[in-house]
Image (spheres, rainbow, N blue to C red):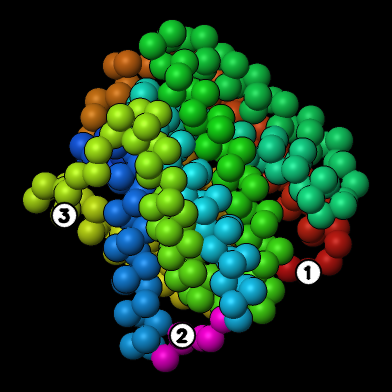
């Protein structure tokens, strides 16, 4: 069990490290995600082939899973765009709005009742984002991109759950990477027309960072999660992943000295967001314990 918890927090650290590459890699956010999905798709295919876990997917499901992959790709584009237009801390903190968008979108998509408690908890996080939005006008575009990123991440999570019933997470991720890669390739002319970003080959340093992002922070992260879920409940894992923004901010402060760019408004906003996340986690824990053993 101790080894499983070490792997759990290592996986959270790797997840938190994905934002760091948004600063390290000099490519535009679009090209960064395009290469990440290409490399990750190749690596996932190799891993599934070697392990004998590759499963046949129907043509209809390939289209559905691929469409979900495009949502993931767009989420990543806006996430890395947010980081490049602001900093890592703001980019990852904005993702905390996922709970707010999930509370809005899930009842509409899955025809569930709206939870007013979830809305209330999420509005606290919205207040935190509002404080962060006003702390420095230079970062407002980054904050707005981060908000769009969190909305797309919420849509990805909800739709991914709907289409993943018949397939393993490895098979889902492979076809999502392929779908996202194909989707971005189709969108590239439009992106190039709007922002004037040419197709570029990564330099040696960027290539190494991209390979690390695709292998360590995507494929290895998935393998760790599978190993952890064999020992620790999915509920505990999901609660633990609320630490991801904290790990990201700590890494950004160590590597990029981002602490000197953040003022009191940011930390007040961060406190409100963390309070919202902890409150939601405690509410979910108490509700689950009341429903029976995990």
- Estimate the spatial distance between the alpha carbons at disc 2 and disc 1, rounded to whole Å: 34 Å
Q: Which residue is mark 1?
A: 293
User: Which residue is the site of mark 3?
Assistant: 208
Count residues near mark 3 (Cα–Cα under 10 Å), then give few for <14, some for 14-19, many for 20+: few
| Badge 3 element | helix
Task: State which tag comes first along the sequence, 2 or 3.
Answer: 2
Give the Cα separation between the discs numbered 2 and 3: 27 Å
Q: Is residue 116 visible?
A: yes
Which image quadrant for residue 177? bottom left
Q: Secondary structure at mark 2?
A: loop
Residue at point 57% right, 38% down? 150
96 w.r.t. 267: above or below? below
Q: Is residue 29 left or right of residue 103?
A: left
Q: Which residues are magenta?
A: 52-57
Q: Position of residue 7 (x, y in %)?
A: 41, 66
Label 1: which secondary element = loop
Quarter the C terminus occupies: bottom right
**Direction from residue 112 to residue 148 in the image, left or right:** left
Q: Is 265 placed above or below 67 here?
A: above
Residue 121 % position (x, y):
74, 32
Q: Percent position (x, y) of residue 190? A: 42, 38
Q: How many marks?
A: 3
Considering depth in this image, is 8 or 145 the residue closer to the camera? Answer: 145
Give the left or right position of residue 107, taking residue 213 as reference: right
Disc number lying in front (3 or 1):
3
Q: In this figure, which residue is indicated by the disc labeled 2?
A: 54
**Which numbered disc flags the more N-terminal residue, 3 or 1?**
3
Q: Examine the structure image and report whether residue 56 is included in the region drawn in magenta.
A: yes
Locate residue 250 relative to residue 279 in the image: left or right.
Answer: left
Q: Residue at x 37, y 32 (%)?
A: 193
């Amino acid at each position: 069990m101790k080894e499983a918890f070490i792997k759990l927090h290592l996986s959270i650290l790797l997840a938190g490290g994905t934002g760091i590459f948004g600063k390290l890699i000099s490519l535009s956010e679009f090209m960064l995600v395009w290469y990440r999905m290409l490399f990750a798709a190749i690596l996932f295919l190799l891993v599934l082939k070697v392990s004998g876990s590759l499963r046949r997917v129907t043509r209809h499901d390939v289209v559905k899973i691929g469409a979900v992959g495009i949502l993931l790709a767009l989420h990543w584009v806006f996430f890395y765009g947010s980081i490049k237009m602001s900093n890592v801390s703001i980019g990852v903190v904005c993702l905390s709005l996922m709970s707010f968008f999930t509370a809005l979108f899930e009842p509409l998509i899955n025809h569930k009742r709206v939870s007013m408690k979830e809305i209330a908890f999420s509005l606290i996080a919205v207040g935190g984002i509002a404080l962060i939005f006003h702390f420095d006008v230079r970062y407002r575009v980054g904050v707005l991109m981060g908000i769009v990123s969190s909305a797309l991440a919420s849509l990805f999570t909800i739709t991914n759950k709907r289409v993943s019933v018949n397939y393993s997470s490895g098979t889902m991720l492979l076809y999502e990477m392929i779908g996202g890669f194909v989707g971005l390739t189709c969108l590239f002319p439009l992106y190039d027309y709007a922002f004037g970003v040419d197709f570029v080959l990564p330099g040696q340093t960027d290539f190494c960072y991209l390979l690390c992002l695709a292998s360590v922070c995507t494929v290895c992260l998935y393998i760790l999660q599978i190993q952890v879920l064999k020992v620790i409940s999915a509920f505990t894992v999901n609660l633990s992943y609320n630490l991801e923004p904290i790990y990201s901010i700590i890494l950004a402060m160590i590597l990029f000295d981002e602490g000197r760019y953040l003022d009191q408004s940011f930390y007040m906003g961060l406190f409100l967001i963390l309070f919202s996340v902890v409150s939601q986690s405690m509410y979910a824990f108490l509700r689950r314990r009341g429903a029976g053993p995990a």
